């Protein structure tokens, strides 16, 4: 068909549909821009790149009027309710559809479409069913029954929910690491004139903890400023930014978080409900803020800028919590230039991409897994979110509450397939034992006992294991206490030929007693995890002893 004929065909169809549907062709984007779905280009906002959708490709296809209108309506509805990025993604993937959209045709083309495009087409047909296009219902049912990997990913040991052992190991490791940094302090060092590198390392480690603590994306953490954290009981509506925090372990903090939307201005959209930080993370934040402020003051005085206490507080409140090093390297000429460089909506000194820097502070080894090699276990905000929602559903929390906790929509929560208690707590003890065998006995017992730390004993003072670093036990939150709570910790090395079986019997008796008292299995998860770790430790010790005997033969 020539361009002229194509234009004539499009013009004629536009006239027919305008007469038939009239005002129902007018949509309004999420940002308040009105557009007619029969126009070739839709302007969705005024933010530059990515603010338009071009649907002119549809005129080159052999869609009948009904199909043409149906697809435009679906894309219009996505532009109305979704971000321009998502709407354009649906527009792009719709090009893969055949000219005749019925169940038989979809079945033919479905295997040829990539997995990511299948997922997006599922969204297109979902919107269509919500708009009551009846002929799409059977297609959507087919797609739902032929999803590739949607269910198994929740069980996938590399991208799905963490097992209890993995999640517990990550939390323990991060807490141990940050307490180690606190114990070392922020004193000046040769590596940095102002000791900023230590402050940066502490901040990025804290970011990893917050990733778990508030269940938000790294991009959201990167947008945080100090004005986003205030004591519980204070109000973010207070127009003053001169908040002063007294260092106190008893004080708890609250944090407000920004939604991150493609193409949206920086820090434009703030979540309605702040998140509360527990006392432990609040203490870490206060330690970090205190040192942050001290180092800013030292740096500014070094370049000849002297601020009052009120001025330094006002400046800090507008600075990023997780700062780029340029903050401590920029030579400001005076106070006016200093305060012009920051602002509540300013992106100055924020990370463009925080995730890569956060990963540099994670231990190369230390996390433990019951399903995959320990060195392959990674901290991922998606996996944290999967885990929190899965646990929440198991504990009968509402969809609304889980959406609020994790910052996703209620519909997103409903899509999660919860892992059963048995599936979450099932452990491959043989593999776990091999992992412990590989990690636990890389040092000789003589070397361990030479370490200037202390030995873990039972109630009869019988030796059970070695604590590699006593600083790693500072702030340990294990409710089970020593020695049962030590098994599985990266800071604990069990000694062979010791009475670990006695600890296993004690833990199993405690578990059975609590079950008989009517406690739910889900309430005994931590104890169940420790039982698994003790069993794996016993297997690893037995294997180690056998190997040692073999070496002596």
Image (spheres, rainbow, N blue to C red):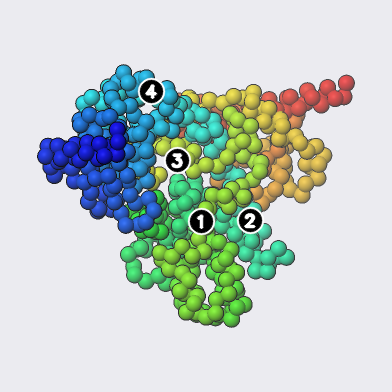
Which of these two is toward me, 114 or 369? Answer: 114
Q: Is residue 38 left or right of residue 49?
A: left
Is any part of residue 249 visible from this angle? no
SS for tag 1?
loop
Task: Tell me the quadrant of the picture where the N terminus can be found.
Answer: top left
SS for tag 2?
helix
Mark 1 or mark 2, whichever is nearer to me: 1
Q: Are marks 1 and 2 in contact (CB under 8 Å)?
A: no
Mark 4 or mark 1, whichever is nearer to me: 4
Structural distance between the alpha carbons of marks 4 and 1:
40 Å
The quadrant in which residue 394 appears is top left
In this view, 135 is above or below 27: above
Nearer-N-terminus badge (2/4): 4
Please, which residue is most extreme toward the right here? 553
Q: Position of residue 421 (x, y in %)?
A: 46, 27
What mark, if any, has residue 385 been given in the picture? 3
Circle 2 residue: 181
The quadrant in which residue 488 appears is top right
């Amino acid at each position: 068909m020539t361009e002229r004929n194509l234009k004539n065909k499009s013009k004629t169809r536009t006239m027919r549909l305008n007469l038939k549907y009239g005002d129902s062709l007018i949509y309004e984007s999420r940002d308040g821009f009105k557009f007619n779905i029969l126009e070739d280009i839709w302007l969705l906002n005024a933010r530059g790149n990515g603010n338009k959708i071009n649907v002119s490709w549809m005129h080159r296809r052999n869609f009948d009027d009904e199909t043409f209108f149906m697809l435009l309506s679906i894309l219009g509805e996505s532009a109305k309710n979704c971000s321009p990025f998502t709407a354009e993604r649906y527009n792009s993937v719709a090009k893969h559809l055949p000219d005749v959209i019925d169940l038989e045709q979809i079945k033919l083309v479905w295997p040829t479409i990539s997995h990511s495009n299948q997922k997006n087409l599922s969204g297109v047909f979902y919107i269509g069913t919500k708009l009551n296009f009846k002929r799409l219902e059977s297609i959507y049912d087919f797609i739902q029954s032929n999803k590739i990997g949607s269910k198994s990913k929740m069980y996938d040991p590399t991208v799905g929910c963490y097992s209890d052992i993995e999640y517990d190991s990550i939390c323990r490791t991060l807490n141990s690491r940050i307490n180690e940094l606190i114990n070392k302090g922020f004193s000046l060092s040769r590596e940095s004139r102002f000791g900023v590198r230590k402050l940066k390392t502490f901040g990025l480690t804290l970011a990893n903890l917050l990733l778990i603590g508030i269940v938000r994306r790294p991009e959201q953490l990167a947008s945080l400023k100090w004005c986003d954290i205030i004591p519980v009981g204070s109000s973010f509506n207070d127009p003053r930014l001169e908040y002063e925090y007294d260092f106190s372990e008893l004080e708890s903090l609250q944090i407000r978080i920004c939604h991150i939307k493609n193409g949206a201005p920086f820090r434009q959209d703030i979540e309605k409900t702040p998140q509360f930080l527990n006392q432990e993370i609040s203490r870490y934040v206060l330690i970090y803020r205190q040192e942050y402020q001290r180092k800013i003051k030292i740096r500014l005085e070094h370049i000849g800028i002297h601020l009052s206490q009120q001025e330094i507080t006002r400046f800090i409140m507008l600075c990023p919590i997780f700062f780029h090093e340029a903050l401590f390297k920029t030579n400001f000429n005076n106070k006016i230039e200093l305060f012009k460089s920051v602002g509540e909506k300013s992106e100055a000194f924020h990370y463009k991409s925080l995730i890569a820097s956060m990963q540099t502070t994670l231990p190369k080894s230390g996390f433990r897994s019951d399903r995959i090699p320990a060195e392959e276990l990674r901290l991922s905000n998606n996996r944290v979110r999967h885990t929190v929602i899965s646990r929440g559903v198991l504990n009968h929390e509402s969809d609304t509450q889980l959406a609020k906790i994790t910052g996703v929509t209620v519909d997103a929560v409903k899509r999660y397939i919860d892992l059963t208690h048995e599936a979450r707590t099932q452990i491959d003890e043989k593999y776990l034992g091999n992992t412990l065998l590989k990690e636990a006995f890389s040092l000789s017992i003589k070397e361990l006992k030479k370490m200037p730390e202390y030995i873990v004993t039972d109630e009869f003072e019988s030796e059970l294991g070695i604590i590699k670093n006593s600083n790693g036990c500072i702030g340990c939150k294990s409710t089970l206490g020593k020695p049962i709570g030590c098994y599985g910790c990266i800071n604990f090395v069990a000694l062979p030929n010791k009475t670990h079986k006695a600890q296993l019997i004690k833990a199993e008796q405690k578990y059975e007693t609590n079950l008989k008292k009517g406690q739910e299995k889900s309430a005994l998860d931590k104890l169940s995890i420790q039982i698994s770790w003790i069993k794996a430790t016993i297997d690893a010790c037995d294997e180690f002893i056998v190997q040692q005997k073999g070496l002596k033969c």
